[in-house]
Amino acid sequence: MFDKNGLLPKLVTYGVCGVALLIVVTLTIQLQVGYLTFDRFPAAITFAYISNVLVLPVLVIGASRSRHFLLPALVWLHFSMAVMLTYFIQVYSPFTAAWAILILLASVYYQWKGFWLSSFVLAILFVLNIFFLQQNTDDGSIVATSLLAGAVVLLTVLTSYMFVTIIVGSQRKTNDLLRAQRSELLQVTRLNTLLNSISDTVLTLNRYGRITSQNAAAQGFFDTNRSLIGRDVDKLLQLTDADDEPVSIRALIDSVKSTSLRDDLSDNNAGEIRHLSIQIARIRGTFGDNEEYGTVLIIRDITKQKTLEEEKDEFISVTSHELRTPVAIAEGSLSNFLLMQDKGASREKMVAVAEEAHRQIIYLANMINDLSTLSRAERGIGSDIEPIKISELLHNLYLKYEPEAKEKSLQLNLDGDHHLPDIETSRLYLEEIMQNFITNAIKYTKQGSITFGAKLESEGWIKFYVKDTGIGINKADLQRIFEKFYRSEDYRTRETNGTGLGLYVVEKLADKLGTKIAVESRFNVGSTFSFVLPVRASGAASVENTDINTENIPVEAPEESGQVPAAE
């Protein structure tokens, strides 16, 4: 009934206004019939009209709309009632019991403080009334009147006390319940926040396998904006095991007594196979209550993890195979060398065998270097961001590889603007990529030139590129050049030593820099490798920590430009 916001209820407001109107009508009738005369109580009658017609309705209506009017309204109610009991109604009248309403109202809003203050006002009114009687009546009736008035006042206070005790107790319990409700709501909110912050899909199921609650990740996992509550989980997930046999969630739940974890399951999501880890836990009562309330289902997409594990296993297998061949050849060559030495073979034959062993050892060293570079990139070693002067970097690369190019009678050209802005990225990764491209260009170019450089692209991109006039790459090989240990079957490629890891490592490093490698090649004409970086840094040395959107990176090969030989 009473407003929890501390406002006077509308029902009480209408009741007080109705009583005030009734008092005005009663006074008017009494004045008309001569029961009361204005000359006898002019101030009291005037006050009664003003209070009940104007002041009291304004205050109680205000108290029903704003808490600021509540205290003035209650005070005026007490004052107005006191005037009525003093001048128009005797304290010993049964009408005095109506004061209990004021006591209850004061107690509802001000607890026991309101009860005692309202009762104290009634007691003062009783004392004043007895004093007034002593001045206007004979001594014979004073005692009886006083006893009767005292009994009415005492009965009013005691009756109000009982009701206030009930009301205050009820309010205390209500407040306790509200606090408990707020605490429970807070806990539920915290739990929901915690569940919604989990990236794994969390579902609760009833005993029939229908979803009763979900976290935010569930809708993303099932790719829907609709609520999943009430839906059958077996219709949402068509699971299969490692043997491609169908698996039912209901069957898994029935076989679980407490908790269970399966990471050998998968489902077909719009033609894409997802590997899943599913943890099942039964929900049971607490404090010895063994009643079962349902099941918690935690689903984790482990496709990437499984893929990485498969790639790791494949990588180890392929690497072991690739290492076994040069080790076997080197070991065989050295064994032959020792045998030939014992047999007194010619120096020319022994040198040939030693050179073969040396080539295989160099091959192994190159493979180990490539593996070491790949390992450093995967572990983030060398990913520190630093400002780099592009022209200085390119010039150092030119000085490093110009003698090697000259040894093969190749023209090494540096094509770049000397006023290019600085960039911020990993110097180690950038140098590894450029060095790989340049060494490949020198290795697979028999005659002609090699040009490398950088140029400012539109929208603040710097394009790095290496262009050669070498043997080129056919279309079939072009699709596979970034695969690990892949080498073309072209005899011209097989003429040179190579591990097949260089471009695989380059692609991994490019991913760390947040860019893509673009390749243009024509068979027997030449190849161009290029990539782009933003003028202001790749932010961090990994795609996850950069703002680069690789889908929008320009990947076209550089246009023909005048090739200016680098200054000596």
Image (cartoon, rainbow, N blue to C red):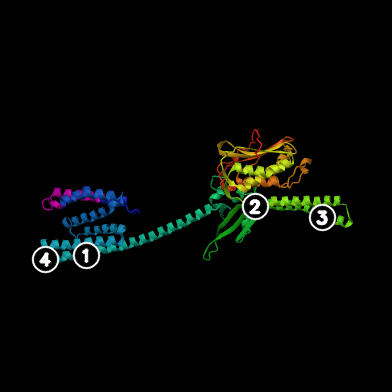
Disc marking residue 151: 1
Disc 3 to disc 1: CB gap under 8 Å = no
Q: Nearer the viewer, mark 3 or mark 2?
A: 3
Identify the magenta region.
Answer: 17-43
Which secondary structure type mostly characterizes the magenta part of the structure? helix
Dot 4, crowdedness within 10 Å: few (<14), some or many (≥20)?
Answer: few
Between 342 and 275, the one nearer to me in the picture? 342
Q: Amino acid at mark 2?
A: Arg
Q: Earlier in the sequence, mark 3 or mark 4?
A: 4
Q: Earlier in the sequence, mark 1 or mark 4?
A: 4
The image shows residue 477, relative to residue 130, as above or below, that is above
Dot 1, crowdedness within 10 Å: few (<14), some or many (≥20)?
Answer: few
What residue is pinned by disc 3? Answer: 334
SS at circle 4: helix
Q: Nearer the viewer, mark 3 or mark 4?
A: 3
What residue is pinned by disc 2? Answer: 376
Between 251 and 439, the one nearer to me in the picture? 439
SS at circle 3: helix
The image shows residue 521, relative to residue 306, as above or below, that is above
